[in-house]
Image: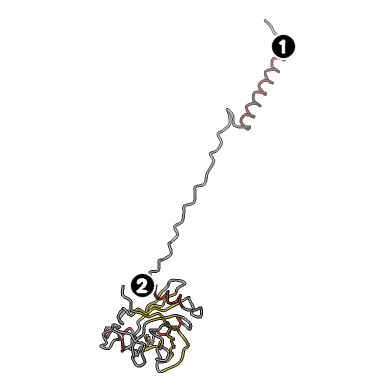
Amino acid sequence: MTFDRRQMFFAGTVFAATSMLAGGTREKSASGPPGKFAPPAPALQVPAPPVPQKVAAAPVIKSVVPVKLLAAAKSALDRQDRSILRDRIAVVDFAAPSSEPRLHLVDLLSGKERSLLVTHGSGSDPDHSGWTRRFSNDEGSIASSEGAFATLNFYSGKHGRSQRLAGLDASNSNALSRAIVIHGAWYAEPNVVDATGKLGRSQGCFAVGDTLIDEVFDHLGSNRLIYAAKLTA
């Protein structure tokens, strides 16, 4: 069978057109939606969850005041009218010897405490053993008294700056007339304990070392409570 020139030209034209259509189809497949010839889509990158940061726990402030004594002090505070401030108190543990820090300055809002040495009266410890043996509310007893006291005004006396106290219980109701106060004293300094194993004695007042007394005054100020007692565990 033979072809003339027009048949050969027509066949070539058809072949070229068919090739162009096929090439266009492949290009569309490569650039269009994923198909037989499309490259794989990149994997979705999911960010790793953040590593949880460890938060330091708040320090636990452990009270050094005997539990029973602190509860009694708070109960005494609750019994007072609102003229007595509720933010800070002082607690004196007369069950401890004078050689130990037994005057506890307690911040009821933060829970912080500071403990200092404090004396008792010579009438409470006639043998000067360092231990509180008895209490009295009587004039001339030169003994310490138990109970709740309210801090009053400051004044300047023979011991320098001092602070008057009012007794709030039957056991210490004569505190003001007996001049039972807070004051500084050389015989209440820590070096006295170092030398003798105990503090000196007052005449029933709460005497704190001269170098530390301002801490007590700053903590208490006026219209706050001091609670003093000798409680057994």
Residue 7: assigned label: 1
Whether residue 142 is visible: yes
Residue 44, x across and y down, in percent: 54, 41
Q: Residue 187: in sight, yes or no? A: no
Q: Residue at x 62, y 27 (%)?
A: 26
Q: Which residue type does callout 1 highlight?
A: Gln
Three-letter amino acid code at the position of disc 2: Lys
Quarter of the figure that contains the N terminus: top right
> According to the image, label 2 marks what residue?
68
Q: Quadrant of residue 113?
A: bottom left
- In-front residue for pair 55/12: 55
Image coords of residue 203 (percent x, y): 34, 90
- Element on which disc 1 rests: helix
Q: Residue at 43% across / 64% down in the picture?
A: 58
**Relative to 182, does residue 20 appear above or below in the rendering?**
above
Q: Which of the 4 image quadrants contains residue 126? A: bottom left
Q: CA distance from mark 1 to mark 2?
A: 121 Å
Q: Residue furthest top?
A: 1
Q: In x, y percent, where is residue 158?
A: 40, 94
Single out the mark in the foreground, 1 or 2: 2
